[in-house]
Image: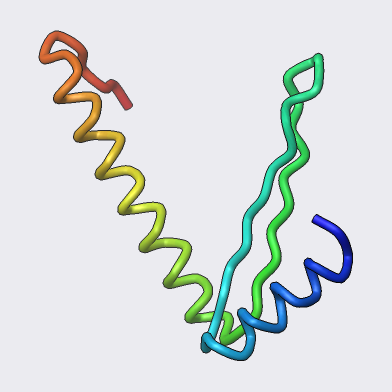
Amino acid sequence: MEHNDYESFMEKLLKNHASYILITCDEPESDGRMNVNMSHEGDSYLVSYLINTAQAMIDEKIDGDISESSSNLRLVK
């Protein structure tokens, strides 16, 4: 994303939302490493709530996918 596009995107986020979180990652390098970036604006408690809620939703989706894909597989923590 070009710098001007990025700035325009960020301005729209701030104009239309009380808070935002943007997480991006590049394609993996040959050694498997990935460059991951996160930016956020808004109240820190709200940002934390959004991240935790999103993580819980993703975990539920993963758990559902695992149980649907094979009843013989069990997740061991």
Q: Residue at x 73, y 31 (%)?
A: 27
Tell which of 7 and 36 is nearer to you: 7
Question: Relative to residue 73, is residue 43 depicted above or below?
Answer: below
- Which corner quadrant holds the N terminus? bottom right
Q: Residue at x 33, y 53 (%)?
A: 56
Q: Is residue 19 left or right of residue 27?
A: left
Tell which of 6 and 61 is nearer to you: 6
Question: Relative to residue 58, is residue 40 depicted above or below?
Answer: below
Q: Residue at x 26, y 22 (%)?
A: 75
Residue located farthest toward the left when viewing the structure as drawn: 71
Question: Relative to residue 62, is residue 42 depicted above or below?
Answer: below
Q: Quadrant of residue 26?
A: top right
Name the spot of residue 74 as percent of width and height, x first.
Answer: 21, 17
Q: Is residue 6 left or right of residue 54?
A: right
Name the spot of residue 10 as percent of width and height, x first.
Answer: 71, 76
Tell which of 14 and 44 is nearer to you: 14
Name the spot of residue 70 as percent of width and height, x first.
Answer: 16, 13
Q: Is residue 76 left or right of residue 14?
A: left
Question: Relative to residue 6, is residue 14 depicted above or below?
Answer: below
